[in-house]
Image (cartoon, rainbow, N blue to C red):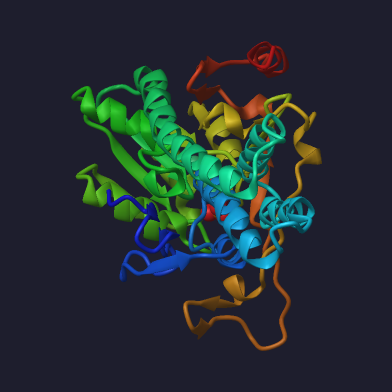
Amino acid sequence: MTEHIQYSPEKDALVLLDQRYLPTREEWFVCKTVNDICEALVVMVVRGAPAIGVTAAYGCYLAAREVKGLVPADGDWKSLLAAKLEQIALARPTAVNLRWAVRLMQAEWAKRPEFSLDELSAFWLAKAKVVHAEDIKTCMVIGQAGMDLLSDGDTVMTHCNAGALATAGYGTALAPIRAAVAQGKKIQVIANETRPFLQGARLTAYELYRDGIPVKVACDNACALLMQRGLVQKVIVGADRIAANGDAANKIGTFGVALLAHEFGIPFYVAAPVSTIDPETAEGSLIPIEDRTPREVTHVGTTQITPDGVGVFNYAFDVTPARLIHGIITERGVLTAPYTEAIAKLFK
Ligand code: MRU
């Protein structure tokens, strides 16, 4: 996979592969300011919980650099910078990785109160590069942790895109699949198309096909039939936020897939880094659900598909209750029920 998140020293900017146009066009979106970063997050130039965390880390660096141009040398740069960090943290509400990355950068700043703005900005750029590199390593460890859950010949269903494009590289839900394939197992993937943004049809299919892993796209509403016909052996999805009791928020439709997997006795796994677990959110009903622009539902590309004036629902995520989850695959191993205990132990 092309590295889709790149810091360019020449441009002194974050350059992102624009996921709105995949798979038909590879265009790049250049972020130089906090507004650019927030636009990229909101319109989903970059999306996927870990990928938006990495983007936010670079965003903190860009915020520091921007503030330098706005405040006189002896001015109150700290409050303006804090406000810009908050703007980034709030760009999307559900994926906790965004807030996680900003809080991480703030905590590093708090340890170094003597830093000048120049020192902080240099420090944050280096730190963002570390967050970026560590995310790829974490995904690879998730792959190792989950690969033995898959058997030779399995067909694995996934929902949305929790692959290289949703992380700094390699993926979360796709990581055990990639690792099992590297072990020599024959694995096929069913990518649910994932209306309305079509992350499955456009992005999961794009990256697996490029990497030579057999993939077929299915309409979201084919899930029950495919499972009933015995065409799915495992389900692995990513997560945007996992509550302290193991309830997991992921792309809208995931809950339905989990209910169907339960009905047909198919193991349903969630794969995510520990940074996606939010021990401060006690249970799934407390996770904020993003309500996105109606246009994503009323249009496919530039084509309008609903009558003028008709309202739509565009909740971007739903929450799968922990009781439907066979295991949460993390870089610290596979967590199993009871999740409240397993998660508390992880954060001890
Ligand atoms: O709205 P998106 O595309 O950012 O939603 C992404 C998902 O729901 C993914 O499945 C999830 O973030 C896991 S990403 C590794």
Q: Quadrant location of residue 323?
A: top right
Q: In this view, does 93 lie to the left or right of 134?
A: right
Coordinates of residue 171 in the picture (x, y in percent): 41, 39
> Residue at 74% across / 56% down in the picture?
74
Give whichever of 55, 120 is nearer the camera.
120
Coordinates of residue 80 in the picture (x, y in percent): 75, 57
The quadrant the C terminus occupies is top right
Coordinates of residue 269 in the picture (x, y in percent): 51, 29
> Residue at 41% across / 19% down in the picture?
145
Furthest toward the front, the residue is 74
Could one spot residue 230 in this view of the protein? no
Q: In this view, does 227 lie to the left or right of 23?
A: right
Q: In this view, does 327 lie to the left or right of 313?
A: left
> Residue at 75% across / 50% down in the picture?
78
Could one spot residue 305 in this view of the protein? yes
Q: Quadrant location of residue 339?
A: top right
Q: Relative to 272, does residue 39 appear above or below in the rendering?
A: below
Furthest toward the bottom, the residue is 308
Q: Relative to 284, does residue 218 appear above or below in the rendering?
A: below
> Residue at 57% across / 33% down in the picture?
263
Give whichever of 238, 253 is nearer the camera.
238
Q: Relative to 183, does residue 112 appear above or below in the rendering?
A: below
Q: Relative to 79, does residue 229 appear above or below in the rendering?
A: above
